[in-house]
Image (cartoon, rainbow, N blue to C red):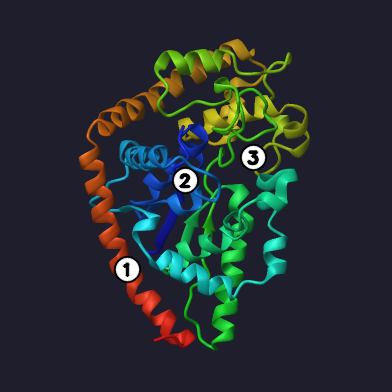
Amino acid sequence: MGRVFSGVQPTGNLHLGNYLGAIKNFVSLQNEHECIYCVVDMHSITVKQDPKTLKNSILEVAAAFVAAGIKPEESIIFAQSQVSAHAELAWIFNCVARLGWLNRMTQFKEKAGKNRENASAGLYTYPVLMAADILAYHATHVPVGDDQRQHLELVRDIAQKFNNDFNMDYFPITKPVIMGAATRVMSLRDGKNKMSKSDISDYSRLNLTDSADDISNKIRKAKTDPLPLPGTDSLDTEGNFKEEIILTRPEAVNLLNIYSALSNENTKKVVERFADNQFSTFKNELNELAVDSLGPINQEMRKLLEDKTYLESILKDGGDRANILAQPIITTVKDIVGFY
């Protein structure tokens, strides 16, 4: 049994991308591994946050974890800032990581955009804190989306360099766990862009707090193209969509991937079932599936958010358990480095 670590940012408006790309997989992993699931509030302040909104968003992520099926009595659910080892280890890793490594991180360039000089230093060193998050628990496996793969490679580089610098095999080389067809869910309004809470149009995403009517309206208005749905000739020998079809029909690929992920069916079976169908028929099926899948989560989240004391108790208990795991590791690291 390995130790799994992963986290979700409390940036508000949790959506289908957060669920399919992360939370849904967290639930399945807890049956096979020791799991630590973190609300990464320290990562969220790399950009300006309203403190009151942030506190509510932390509870919303905790509610989503529990509503989706993560069991707090089995898995650890906590907020990153509750465990000081994250920040302490991040500083040590800042002194291990190389500037050249961080300069290659494409996500910083995407998030900073043209205002790179005005971006926070925290946004730049975000991947180093991510390494500390994972290695503070000697996690062996990390479920990540495709867009986080580069960051996990940096985690491995930092672990290897620390081990080499101090001539010992202390930190494990963490393995990525990339699961399912929809690890990267795209916008319902533009299949070339990732589904995001920052998109101006609320119709670009399915929020976990959306009602059944909201879900139906958004799926009905989701962007498509004039052609029938693609057939199996759009798939490669491994059953994944070919690069050409992803580039030319991104909305069709996105909706089929979403159906595949929600239904737990592989992409090939879904494509075979709907090949050459019109989008109107397919959208009816997708709508029913989405409402059935997300409706219970929506209802449970609303119920949980009415009892903030309960959610806070989950985070408190999880923080205490996380500290028990992390403290011996950070204490040993300090000794290895030469700190008292």
- Residue 284 x/y as whole percent: 51, 13
Q: CA distance from mark 3 to mark 1?
A: 40 Å
Determine crowd level at label 1: few under 14, some 14-19, many 20+ residues with C-alpha closer than 10 A: some
Instruction: Left or right? Give the position of 153 relative to 19.
Output: right
Q: Pointer 3: what residue?
A: 239
When asked about the image quadrant of residue 176, the answer is bottom right
- Residue 18 x/y as whole percent: 49, 38
When asked about the image quadrant of residue 94, the answer is bottom right
Q: How many marks?
A: 3
17 over 209 or under it: above or below? below
Q: Pointer 2: what residue?
A: 9
Dividing the image into 4 quarters, which one contains the N terminus?
bottom left
The three-letter code of the residue at mark 3 reads Gly
- Residue 100 x/y as whole percent: 72, 68
Secondary structure under the numbered disc 3 in the rendered image: loop
- N-terminal of the pair, mark 3 or mark 1, is 3
Instruction: Left or right? Give the position of 78 relative to 105.
Output: left
Query: Toward the viewer: 280 or 92?
Result: 92
Q: Is residue 265 visible?
A: no
Q: CA distance from mark 2 to mark 1?
A: 22 Å
The mark found on residue 96 in the picture is: none
The three-letter code of the residue at mark 2 reads Gln
Q: Pointer 1: what residue?
A: 325
Q: Residue at x 51, y 20 (%)?
A: 286
Q: CA distance from mark 3 to mark 2?
A: 32 Å
The three-letter code of the residue at mark 1 reads Leu
